[in-house]
Amino acid sequence: HDVTPVSPDYVISDRFAGKTYIVTGSARGMGKVAADRLAREGANVVGVDWIADEGAAVIAAIKAAGGKAEFVPGDVSDTAVCDRMVEVAVSTFGGLDGAINNAGVMDAIPPSEPIDYDKQKDLAFNPVHLASDAYWDVVMRVNATGVFRCMRAQLRHMVEQGKGGSIVNVASVAGLRGFSSTPSYVASKHAVNGLTKNAAIDYAPYGIRINSVNMANTDTPMVQRAKQLVGARMKALGGVGMGTIKTRSLLQYADTNHRDATPEEQVAIMLFLLSDEASNITGANWATDGGFTTY
Ligand code: ADP
């Protein structure tokens, strides 16, 4: 028996009225849903994405529906873009109450390129001995360095502002476990969880809570793309295992009874962590994975 996913027709509350949040990766997937739902629940939203046209369209749609939102195009691993997202929050909405640092990549293929595994395998999923510098560098830069630089800009302002707040970093079950052929993804998401725990300690005295969520497959464009790429990689490598360690693919649970989570289900958890109802939760690396990491 399947549990019914959260409806996209959200229950509307005003729990974030008057608050301002940054959402990175707001053009697609979970970030898009998070920006939309935060605005529906009264927040001022600053969306950030390096896909400028889709990102601007998402924010325009939120505004057309009566929400308060601004868009900052750019790469979250660029310090100038991180400073800009905070400046826009402060100059447009008068402050910053927190962020969902959600932008991330699983491969180093530019978002504008169509997927062609044979041509792009150096930029996609590989075990360490086959991994290129480009694959390692891009994924580490966006996922790990990007979260660090975004948090740094956000926290500089939030500390000075002195009103506390809440930050949610989006990691992955790959931040809690190892998976085959994804060395920089797994390393970068472990870094997100480590950064989250570290910052939670340093900013607790300022009343700023910092948590991460670790989802398994969620029905987003990134996971659809990964299914194509990992499928090709696993086929090329064959099932290599060592002793009792079976080759474990990030997508293996597609073969089990699990279903992909919906972006709405993940966003419901992120917004709970942002809200004051989560006032005693900080430094947590939550597994929001439908039970995936229980085995
Ligand atoms: P998911 O929702 O599963 O995390 P998606 O690919 O659907 O994955 O959404 C991730 C979003 O993050 C996309 O809109 C993507 O363009 C954005 N993104 C990824 N890397 C960056 C980056 N370096 N800078 C800004 N936005 C980024």
Image (spheres, helix red, strand yellow):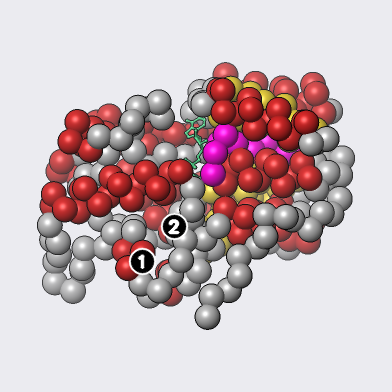
Specify start and end residues of the magenta stretch as a single range.
20-29
Residue at image mark 1: 253
Question: Eyeballing the image, is 287 above or below 13?
Answer: below
Q: Hey, which quadrant is residue 18 in on the image?
A: top right
- Residue 207 is at least partly visible in this image: yes
Q: Is residue 166 above or below residue 74?
A: below
Residue that carries the numbered disc 2 in the rendered image = 217
Mark 2 Cα-neighbour bin, 10 Å: few <14, some 14–19, many ≥20: many
Q: Position of residue 89 (x, y in %)?
A: 75, 28
Residue type, numbered disc 2: Asn
Q: Amino acid at mark 1?
A: Tyr
Instruction: Report whether residue 164 is seen.
Output: no
Q: Nearer the viewer, residue 257 or 189?
A: 257
Residue at left offset 71%, top offset 32%? 61
Q: Can you give x and y, in whole percent of width and height, for residue 166 in the image?
A: 71, 48
Placement of 81 over or under 209, stated as above or below: above
Say few, some or many: other residues with alpha carbon within 10 Å of mark 1 (under 14 / 14 to 19 / 20 or more): some
* 255 lies left or right of 193: left
In this picture, residue 152 sits left or right of residue 193: right
Percent coordinates x, y for residue 221 in the rendering: 46, 43
